[in-house]
Image (cartoon, rainbow, N blue to C red):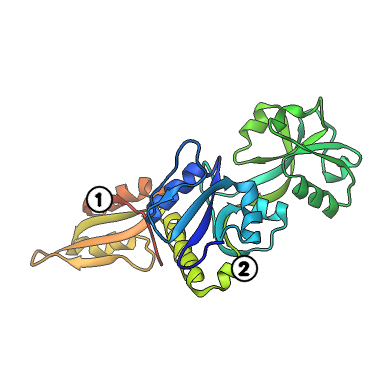
Amino acid sequence: MATGNKIILGIPKGSLQESTFAMMKKAGFSISVGSRSYIPTVDDPEIEARLIRAQEISRYVEQGLLDAGLTGFDWITENQSDVHEVANLVYSKQELRPVRWVLAVPNASSIQSAKDLEGKRIATEAVGLTKQYLARHGVKAEVEFSWGATEVKAPELVDAIVEITETGSSLRANNLRIVDTVLESTTRFIANKKSWADSWKREKIENLALLLRSVLAAESKVLLKLNVNEANLKPVTALLPALHSPTIMPLSGSGWYAVETVVDNSALRTLIPKLKAAGAEGIIELSLNKIIP
């Protein structure tokens, strides 16, 4: 565990690595790592980073070898790690949404529910999660650890698999259908409980969590700026959603106003034509790095 005014932070190696680096960059922390190193360089002397598989981070945080780390709720549950959850950060390698561990079987399988797994063989990387799922349903089945390529093991080697998915495309490509969701998971920012009890480390971890949450809050938002004359001000502003209300500033001696607000990026395709029709001019869309309520 780090001592003094420094924390050791676990960053997930693998599928979440690039998206985590990008999120940290937007939060204000530049991270670089050599091709064979597990110790990245962070441009903050108060943070030491370790690049570790997400499957292992919660164990090292619990043991105090890391002060804090980013890992999936699935691996915290799999390892049954006793850690403090600082923040729920909804991002994955592809999209800003949870991932799922699902029970999947070949399309032609007779298995329709967890009850049909009695006496069957299941392959998965998440052995603990799968056994917990079976126990909840009162089912006894053989669960074997899969080293990878789990989708291709059914039906020749196993009856079913439990696999992680974001879109389900890989399962469909391997002629598998989803029977049930075993666990929905998002990335969690976690801390060692002794580190959390240390006032300096807790403040550092809380500040980092604040910045990471602000980055994710900004991912789907944009700043919209426009000009509008006084006659059209009310109909234009009535169209605008905002965190609270639009910012409206008079332009000196002209009878025109500058208006700005934060909106969902997905709303722009319908909103901008309506604003233009209502009299808005000089419409500018700006991307955001952080939103802190």
Q: Nearer the viewer, residue 100 or 256?
A: 100
Residue 257 spot, x, y in % from top left:
18, 63
Name the spot of residue 166 as percent of width and height, x first: 60, 41
Disc 2 packing (10 Å; few <14; some 14–19; many ≥20): some
Contact between labelled residues 2 and 1, with CB atoms less than 8 Å apart: no
**Quick check: 195 above or below 26?**
below
Which of these two is toward me, 225 or 106?
A: 106
Residue 220: tell me if it is visible.
no
Residue occupying the far left of the picture: 253
Identify the residue at image location x=88%, y=37%: 120
Disc 1 is placed on an element classified as strand
Quadrant housing residue 207: bottom left
Q: Which mark is residue 201?
A: none
Does residue 76 appear in this view? yes
Q: Residues within 10 Å of mark 1 (few under 14, many from 20)?
A: few
Earlier sequence position, callout 1 versus callout 2: 2
Instruction: Report the residue at 68% width, 63% height from top.
Output: 82
Identify the amino acid type marked 1. Answer: Ile
- The residue that disc 2 covers is 193
x 51%, y 70%: residue: 202
Of discs 1 and 2, which sits in the foreground? 2
Q: Which residue is mark 1?
A: 284
